[in-house]
Image (tube, rainbow, N blue to C red):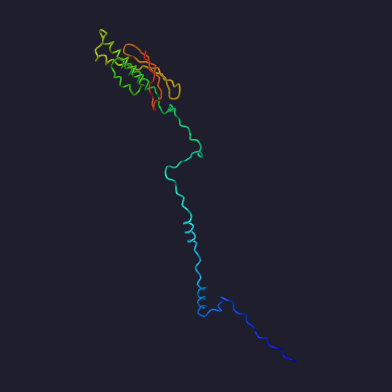
Amino acid sequence: MTAPALRPTVRPAPARGTTADRPAADRSTTSVQRAVVPPAPRRADFATATAMLTPRTRRPAGPREFSHAAAGPLPARDESGIRPPAELGDPTALCCAVAHAAIESLRGIRPLTQLARSVSPEIFDALHARAQVRVAARRRAAGSLPANQERQLRSRVRRARVVRIAPGVAEATVVVDDVDRVRAAAVRVEEHRGRWRVVVLEIG
């Protein structure tokens, strides 16, 4: 028998660009370059980059506008200015004092300025005009008492009655002994800036 012929072993040629074609020095350099791996980026780097790319929202200059539509309507203010009568107190003492002082002012024995804060400007002007007429009439009358003796004859309040007709409104009737006669005064008081004030005064 004839022995089989031996075939030569053919090795594939190395591909271009591989480490087999390169010199030993190049292969060592390539292996070293591949071994160096850059570090992975940190979260802080991403946060810094995001903050730099995101534009900041600035508030516009000038006054800002506010809306109260969501809060609902505001409660209405009380413009009447009327307080409960309990806070004003009892007006009886004021009615008696004003009636008493007005009668003595008409006689000229008490200064009318004492009533300036207790009565309205209209009442004060009316009392002033009436007092001037009464003083002039007494001076012309014959046999009038001297001024010092007339000042000694003081009047006094006999009785008074006060009726509350509405919140902050009251009316009173005051009876005064005026030396030789009895006089009655009708008084109406109303609330004014947190206190009572006489707005009507009629003396009989």
Q: Nearer the viewer, residue 164 or 81?
A: 81
Relative vertical location of residue 196 with respect to residue 145 in this rendering, above or below:
below
Q: Position of residue 192 (x, y in %)?
A: 39, 25
The relative height of residue 56 versus residue 15 in the rendered view (above or below) is above
| Residue 79, quarter of picture | top left
Residue found at the very far right of the displayed protein: 1
What count of labels does the image hold?
Answer: 0
Quick one: 64 or 89, which is closer to the camera?
A: 64
Q: Residue at x 33, y 22 (%)?
A: 116
Could you say which quadrant of the image residue 188 lies in? Answer: top left
The image shows residue 133 at horizontal and vertical percentages of 30, 12
Is 90 on the left-hand or right-hand side of 50?
Answer: left
Please tell me which residue is depicted at 28% across the width and 12% down the height of the picture: 136
Q: Is residue 84 above or below residue 109?
A: below
Tell me the quadrant of the picture where the C terminus can be found. Answer: top left
Which residue is situated farthest in the bottom direction here?
A: 1
Image quarter where the N terminus lies is bottom right
Residue 129, percent from left and from top: 32, 15
Residue at 45 percent of width and 23 percent of height: 166
Give the percent coordinates (x, y) of residue 119. 36, 21
Task: Tell whether 178 sits left or right of 166.
Answer: left
Most distant residue in the top direction: 142
Q: Which sits in the foreground, 7 or 60?
A: 7
